[in-house]
Amino acid sequence: QIDYATTNTYQEHDTSSTTLSVSWLHYDEPRKTAETQERLNMSESMPTPFECYLNAWRRYVDFNGRSRRREYWFFVLFNVLISIGLGIIDGIFRLGNIEMGVGLLSSLYGLAVLLPSLGYAVRRCHDIGRSGLWLLLLVIPFLGPLIILVFMLMDSEPGSNDFGPNPKGEEAVEEV
């Protein structure tokens, strides 16, 4: 709910006798209701997308605890974007074996991100109440990766579980 305080209009005449009109809207401070304040408090505890990516590097060999679905998917998004960028650089500078589609920078990044990805995936499994050993399903062609994808899309298990407290807080707040 935003109060529209005033609208100022500035008009300027140019040499071709047309009028340029620019308007500014001035907003008063929005009223903070209990619901608005609750949303603000919730957003303060949520890491930004880039912080989600950095958290993987800070906890790159931490296979304990739980990670939220939002954190995991932002990490995946940044990995895809970085991999695409490195693939383009590999192609431009002809780094690696282009015929096989293996670039030097892309390969090095893939190796570097292996442990952080595994750590996030294990913590994500913990968040839905499953052991990280479920990731061994990835060795089963087609069906295994599909099952893991479904696991990674599932919402957090409410409350605490065997792997720690809910990263969303005691009350499982619905993610938007």
Image (spheres, rainbow, N blue to C red):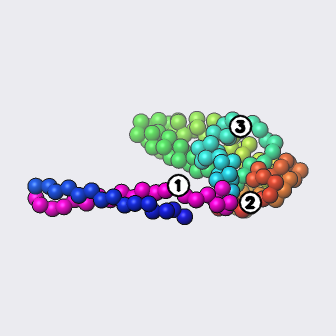
Q: How dense is the environment of label 3, judged by Cα within 10 Å: few (below 14), some, or many (20 and up)?
A: some
Do residues under tags 3 and 1 come within 8 Å of each other at their CB atoms? Answer: no
Identity, as a three-letter code, of the amino acid under mark 3: Tyr
Residue 52, given in percent of the width and then of the height, sits at: 64, 45
The dot on residue 138 is none
Residue sitting farthest toward the right: 162
Q: Earlier in the sequence, mark 2 or mark 1?
A: 1
Q: Quadrant of the C terminus?
A: bottom right
- The residue range painted magenta reads 16-37
Q: Nearer the viewer, mark 3 or mark 1?
A: 1
Give me the C-alpha separation between circle 3 and circle 1.
Answer: 42 Å
Residue 6: image quadrant is bottom left
Check disc 2 and report its element: helix, strand or loop: loop
The dot on residue 29 is 1
Check disc 1 and report its element: helix, strand or loop: loop
Give me the C-alpha separation between circle 2 and circle 1.
Answer: 27 Å
Residue sitting farthest toward the front: 5
Q: Nearer the viewer, mark 2 or mark 1?
A: 1
The dot on residue 173 is 2
Residue labelled with disc 3: 60
